[in-house]
Image (tube, rainbow, N blue to C red):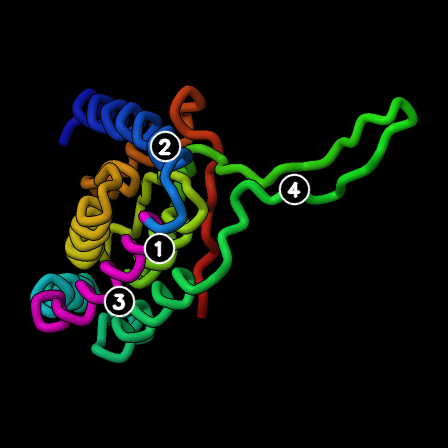
Amino acid sequence: MNAPNVADTMHTLGLQARQASRAMARAGTAARNAALRTLARLLRENVPALQAPNERDLARAREAGLAEPMVDRLKLTPKIIETCAEGCEQLAAMPDVIGDIVGMKQQPSGIRVGQMRVPIGVFGMIYESRPNVTIEAASLSIKSGNACILRGGSEAIDSNKALAALVQQALESAGLPREAVQLVPTTDRAAVGQLIAMPEFVDVIIRAAARA
């Protein structure tokens, strides 16, 4: 994928994320929690199907000479997938904080002023290695009523694509826009530069540190 195509791809992702973020901000708690519960179910149902893309990532990593600890980070074992599913269910069971008002204070004029918790809009997240981060980031985005654009490490591209497809399936099943969670589909590093340079579409960039 050449540079102009990367720019076009990222612009499309950004535009779709911005549009989806408006629907997510309006979405009710029930719909967002339903998407999370469906995602948990889909993860469990697709444990065998997730192994093939994960094996492709593992094979490429070994061929590239990655150290075994790095290869281990790429693995999507049944245990890891179950942990992801449980995390989705735990988020769904948590109270919804959107709309909560905190720090309420009364001014001398008699007006009461506080801070309301609202969705950010769109966040971009850049992370490496562990494909389970795709589910963690997506589920948090859904719970908080945001949209997100995820850019995982190139070494986990096939696993991340498979996981992102399940997330979008879960969103659609709950009547939410599938574009609320999008994965950058290219390993071209130019995509990162594009992602961090789209303030008209992306409100916050999160750079996740690698974990040992």
* Kind of residue at disc 2: Ser
CA–CA distance in space, label 3 to label 1: 28 Å
| Residue that extends furthest to the right in the rendered view of this protein | 108
Q: Residue at x 19, y 40 (%)?
A: 186
CA–CA distance in space, label 4 to label 2: 21 Å
The image quarter in which residue 24 lies: top left
Q: Start and end of the magenta stretch? A: 31-50
* Kind of residue at disc 1: Asn
Q: Earlier in the sequence, mark 1 or mark 4?
A: 1
x and y percentages locating residue 143 in the rendered image:
41, 51
Q: Earlier in the sequence, mark 2 or mark 3?
A: 2
Q: Earlier in the sequence, mark 3 or mark 1?
A: 1
* Kind of residue at disc 3: Leu
Q: Which mark is residue 101?
A: 4
Label 4 element class: strand
Q: Is residue 48 magenta?
A: yes
Q: Residues within 10 Å of mark 3 (few under 14, many from 20)?
A: many
Q: Residue at x 33, y 39 (%)?
A: 149
Q: Are marks 4 and 2 in contact (CB under 8 Å)?
A: no
| Secondary structure that dominates the magenta span | helix
User: Is 39 left, or right, of 18 in this rendering?
Assistant: left
According to the image, label 3 marks what residue?
Answer: 74
Q: Earlier in the sequence, mark 2 or mark 1?
A: 2
Q: Are marks 3 and 1 in contact (CB under 8 Å)?
A: no
CA–CA distance in space, label 4 to label 3: 40 Å
